[in-house]
Amino acid sequence: MTVRKKHTTIRDIARLADVSYQTVSLVINDKPGVSDKTRKRILRLMDEMDYRPNRAAQMLSTNRSNTLELIVVDVTYGGRLADSTKNMVRAARASGYGLLISETTLESLPDALEGAAARLVDGILMYAPRLRIGDQELLGMCDGIPLVRRDYVPGSKIAWVGFDQAYATRLATEHLIDLGHRHIAAIPPNADMINGYWRYTTWKNVLLEHGLEPGPAFTGDYSMQSGYEAAQQIIDSGQPVSAILVGSDNMAVGALKALRERGLRVPDDVSVAGFDNTELSSYTDPQLTTIDFKFASQDEMAVKYLLELIEDPQTELHQRVLMSDLVVRDSTRPLASPNSGER
Amino acid sequence: MTVRKKHTTIRDIARLADVSYQTVSLVINDKPGVSDKTRKRILRLMDEMDYRPNRAAQMLSTNRSNTLELIVVDVTYGGRLADSTKNMVRAARASGYGLLISETTLESLPDALEGAAARLVDGILMYAPRLRIGDQELLGMCDGIPLVRRDYVPGSKIAWVGFDQAYATRLATEHLIDLGHRHIAAIPPNADMINGYWRYTTWKNVLLEHGLEPGPAFTGDYSMQSGYEAAQQIIDSGQPVSAILVGSDNMAVGALKALRERGLRVPDDVSVAGFDNTELSSYTDPQLTTIDFKFASQDEMAVKYLLELIEDPQTELHQRVLMSDLVVRDSTRPLASPNSGER
DNA sequence: CCACCTAACTTGACCGTTCAATATAATAAC
DNA sequence: GTTATTATATTGAACGGTCAAGTTAGGTGG
């Protein structure tokens, strides 16, 4: 087995190039003060000896790590997270940063942040869909490290990048209303999720605005199973329902199954709309009407914003709100007029 | 905005505790040679001053980072990766390690590994479903850092943890044969994926063993769309097909859509079996027969194995092979004999 | 009472960089 | 030909720890 060889250092190169090691440092960092001839010679030597600067040593003297940390707080259902992670890793890397990922719960969030500080990360991305915390308290724990939440956190003046959930929900709800539905149920994400709160209240408010009585609502945790169970409860409630607004495509798939099992046809008997526009939504039967969130943009934007804050800590903190579109497919349709026949 | 305060160091604590800073170091590392009284005092001070050891400094002197790196090579379709990432992060963290994630392509793999070395990571996890490379070449790039591939790489003597793809494929294929199917098509992952190769050849060999002619096969890239397209091609091939073995649940969902569109009922006209046993497979219509891979075990095992290698670099490299189970649901059923007129 | 031992600390060196201050040589200015 | 200027390179210190070797004080044995 290969043995871990001792790495060549800046001094090894310096000795071979017959200069002081500090000169080599200048070359590494592309700083002026080195003649072209010498620079070339050093560069060649670095290549030959396959020298790599020791990041730990660099970190120690610069107090920077060129690393970001993504802290995931209290996320139980993995689903979408995977792709977002990839997006952020990519975006960070594109700017020469590494991305460390850590998971934590609300209680140990302070530890997680301390850990990040100890690791000298240059910035923190936080994905914490349930975290409701005062700005000051959160900033206090960050020890001055720039932070961007990749979440919709209305009311917080901390930097965040998120989709306007109220807008999205209104879009979907009004779509159903426009189709003539009057009895609209909902399966929003659990209320402890910030998105869940907004999806639920907006759904309700929009209905009320239109003079409609909100239908039954049962929450889910983004899993297909929770959507399945919630849909069952809606059906079992006995209340008239001609449309269901489901808080994710994933849960909508569960709801579709429940409706199928109970003999209800979509969209003939019940219209269903989802959120997220995942690939799945084009492959259900019928294909799902859904809200298209451009998660890739959100991920990338969060990283970019964080990098801006790192570059210039004086940047005024602000919030970046993204809008979404409605994608109408086959799971929603105009309410069949009373005693309409079917094929 | 909070300003990044200068961190307290070991020397600050030492000064306050009226000992040398080296003594504080002993306390940090739980080493003997410090009286209980002093230790307590130092610990209390560390707490009060909320002191955190500077990881960079530790790394610099110990040449270790307490960090693992997951290198993802040439993975285009994210899907499952998300959860695996989480599993590994969790497993690593449970042993006091952080997990850095990086993505790369085959060409820049050497760079990625050099980067890992520069970061002083203690071990490397590699997820590289398409990477075929000589053991020596790969080890050579690793610079002596322990490496575990989280993949099925038969033929490689490097440490890896993977599911026996031949076993899994045989399980699924023989299930279809046992049901009486004689015309079995396949949608394996692309042949450039190691799994794809094994799924394809095993499928073919098992059929031949049983004296059956392999049906049409078209590969996919794990996306629903690729499954959809492959299924269309199978249908369009005009060859008789009563069952399709699809290389992932995801692609199977695509295949189901294609069959649906062409008026073929599952399982009445065509049986479909998938791989992965994702949550989705219980929510399709009909529910999917599939191969259950315990990915969580694989992820965890890969991390544990790597940690063992780090602890004791003399550990004999070996391969850990995991087996899978068949989960029979509603998408496969015995070939209806009256209709087909063959056995 | 002295030699010896051990527990509890301290000393000094080092890890591989960066950074600010300084030296040197060559060139330009007068 | 002296002086100022610049480009290039060097020196020394610092970053915050770890580690091996040395010192000291107090207790023990004979």
Image (tube, coloured by chain):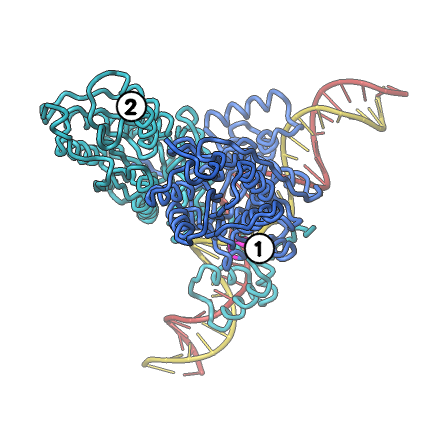
Chain colours: A blue, B cyan, C red, D yellow
Magenta stretch containing residue A74, yes or no?
A: no
Q: Residues within 10 Å of mark 2 (few under 14, many from 20)?
A: some
For the residue pair B251 and B68, the one nearer the viewer reads as: B251
Residue A132 is labelled as: 1
Range shown magenta = A111-116
Which numbered disc, 1 or 2, marks the residue closer to the eye? 1
Q: CA distance from mark 1 to mark 2?
A: 48 Å
Decide: is A267 above or below A48. below
Give the amino acid type for the residue marked by disc 2 in the picture. Answer: Ala
Q: Is residue A159 visible?
A: yes
Decide: is A61 above or below A91. below
Picture coordinates of residue C15 (x, y %)?
49, 44
Which residue is disc 2 drawn over?
B191
Q: Main secondary structure of the magenta part?
A: helix
Picture coordinates of residue A105 (x, y %)?
48, 55
Q: Quadrant of the C terminus of chain B?
A: top left
Q: Is residue B264 left or right of residue B173?
A: right
Q: Identify the residue shown where x is 43% and y is 62%.
A: B31
For the residue pair B128 and B341, the one nearer the viewer reads as: B341
Q: Is residue A58 visible?
A: no
